[in-house]
Image (tube, rainbow, N blue to C red):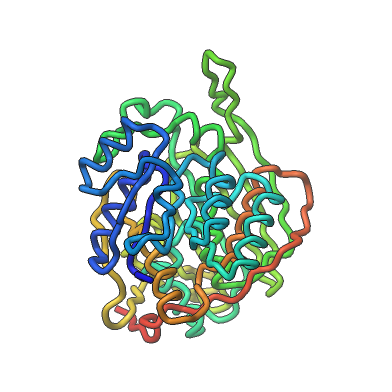
Amino acid sequence: MNLRNIGIIGTGFVADLYMRSLRTFPEIKVVKAYDSDQTRLSEFCRYWQVAPAGSIDELLDTGPSSPEVILNLTNPSSHFEVSRICLTAGKHVYSEKPLATAMDEAKTLCALAESKGLLLASAPCSVLGEAAQTLWLALRQNTIGKVKLVYAELDDDFVAQAPYRNWLSLSGAAWPYRDEFRVGCTLEHAGYYVTWLLAMFGTIEKVIAASANIADIKFDDGFTAAPDYSCATLFFKSGTVVRLTCSIIAPHNHKIRIIGDDGILELDKCWDNEAPVRVRRRHVFRRRLINSPITKRIKINGTTHPKVKRWGAAALNFALGPAEMLAAIRESRPCRLSSGFALHLNEVTLAIQNANGVQLMQTACPPIEPMSWAKTSEAL
């Protein structure tokens, strides 16, 4: 068993982001890649110097160089079937988001993984990154007292008016705009903050959401886009209340503000592993309540994880999730990104997008262990 070998299924736009990130983990080796589009597969493998597999069966072969973990980077409508095939073949699976586009499919995958003693996880993995871990550490250190309310924003500007048909990845893959618009910004983006919130505050018990299709994106073949705006209030079992917005309409805004009894924690860029976390205090001055114009940055002491330079809109290390899975296998310990965590994330994001009034969650979020390097911090 080689605990550093991984395989990739799906060599489209996002696969290049993973390859850039995997290069920061020299101990991890991509042994083979597969895509049903042979031209795309050839372009990807030539650019990254990865061996192509002629079929999924060849990729899942159990030979000496067989991958232990499969990265499922296919389009969202294929996630369930591809992950099912890989789990059935005895492979651990790390899937791009969402885990599945329907909850019954997500539950089937989790049950299959459990029955075979396999790990199953889904993106995003930025919860394992420096910015999220710093924010979480500040909360564990009681920096702002008891948390009362959280505002989180994931707005990405008016994408329908952007030149998205011209967006290409490093190896030349076109941005999959049909998949992106069909799946919707909520399923694609809400997880970037929902994973952080689940790690920090635990299980979400109730979701109240509204969503709408505002841009009225249409194509000649009758293609229907998913909602391009959603706003949800998330009620956590711990008592925390969160307002989360997602859109590809409003001007770019990726801020999160965590409001506590003794101040506010702020972060501006969730798509940046090195985004600064700042604390803002509250004061009373001449009978007025004032939020201080001066903030202090909170920074983790010591080395955190490998960083990836900005490409496009993000400066994220997409390999933190696969690396965590491989480490969990090697160390015979639970994976921080567990199948139960992925299942709860899947239910919450579907609830936000579907916006069917008051929705009580049927799943729960198992605890996540903070990263070992996120132990102490200092205020700058």
- Residue at point 49% right, 76% down? 283
- Residue at point 47% right, 81% down? 332
Quadrant (top left, top right, bottom left, bottom right) of the N terminus: bottom left
x and y, in percent, of residue 347 in the image: 67, 55
Total labels: the figure holds: 0
Quadrant (top left, top right, bottom left, bottom right) of the C terminus: bottom left
Q: Is residue 118 above or below residue 122?
A: below
User: Hey, which quadrant is residue 45 in on the image?
Assistant: top left
- Residue at point 49% right, 81% down? 333
x and y, in percent, of residue 265 in the image: 46, 70
Q: Residue lying furthest front in this view?
A: 63
Task: Tell me, yes or no, if residue 5 can be seen here.
Answer: yes
Of residues 271 and 86, the one drawn nearer to the viewer in this rendering: 86
Q: Is residue 353 above or below residue 228?
A: below
- Residue at point 53% right, 46% down? 82
x and y, in percent, of residue 53 in the image: 35, 44
User: Hey, which quadrant is residue 271 in on the image?
Assistant: bottom left
Q: Is residue 370 left or right of residue 168?
A: right
Q: Is residue 210 above or below residue 114?
A: above
Q: Is residue 163 left or right of residue 237?
A: left
Task: Tell me, yes or no, if residue 285 can be seen here.
Answer: no
Q: Is residue 206 above or below residue 294?
A: above
x and y, in percent, of residue 170 in the image: 24, 40
